[in-house]
Image (spheres, grey):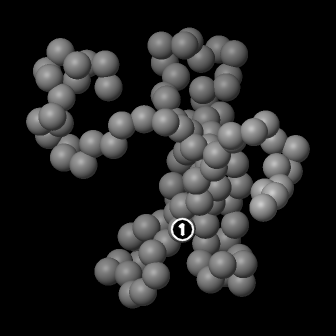
Amino acid sequence: MHTPSFGLPSGVKFVLRKKPAGQLLSSTAHAVEREFRVLNAIHQHNKLPSTPVNMRVPIPEPIALCEDNSVIGTPFYIMEFLEGRIFEDPRLLEVTPPDRKEL
């Protein structure tokens, strides 16, 4: 089976973020359009030559936003895939206090 590369280097991965299926609890919940715009603003800040390295926020690069429901049934955006750890508990109990400073 051949997977098209679209001219991208081998192994490049992306993430598609979309609203979940079904009834949402709130009209502002899962606002992927807002998520994209915030990520994009931070990404633009990170790219400024005047932004010092220690002031850059480590985020995935936002690639594209699609607000056309006819494409997949809901708005979505594509962003760069980054390897990393996922912390499900905001108290970070599984991370030692000295390591928390590195997050």
Residue at point 88% right, 44% down? 7
Q: Position of residue 91 (x, y in %)?
A: 14, 40
Asked whether 68 or 98 is in front, the reply is 98
In the displayed orientation, state which residue is furthest to the front.
1
Please give left or right for residue 6 compared with residue 11 in the image.
right
Q: Position of residue 63 (x, y in %)?
A: 69, 48
Q: Position of residue 77 (x, y in %)?
A: 62, 60
Where is 64 relative to 53, above or below? below
Mark 1 = which residue?
A: 18
Quadrant of residue 50 in the image? top right
Please give left or right for residue 68 compared with residue 26 in the image.
right
Residue at point 38% right, 81% down? 24
Give the structural element (helix, strand or loop) at label 1. Answer: strand
Asked whether 85 or 37 is in front, the reply is 85
Please give left or right for residue 45 compared with residue 100 in the image.
right
Q: Position of residue 18 (x, y in %)?
A: 54, 68
- The reply to whether residue 40 is visible in this rendering is no
In the displayed orientation, state which residue is furthest to the bottom.
23
Please give left or right for residue 68 compared with residue 51 in the image.
right
Q: Amino acid at mark 1?
A: Lys
* Quadrant showing the N terminus: bottom right
Asked whether 91 or 13 is in front, the reply is 13
Where is 90 relative to 48, above or below? below
Residue at point 32% right, 25% down? 103
Residue at point 43% right, 67% down? 30
- The reply to whether residue 83 is visible in this rendering is yes
Where is 76 relative to 102, above or below? below
Where is 41 relative to 15, above or below? above
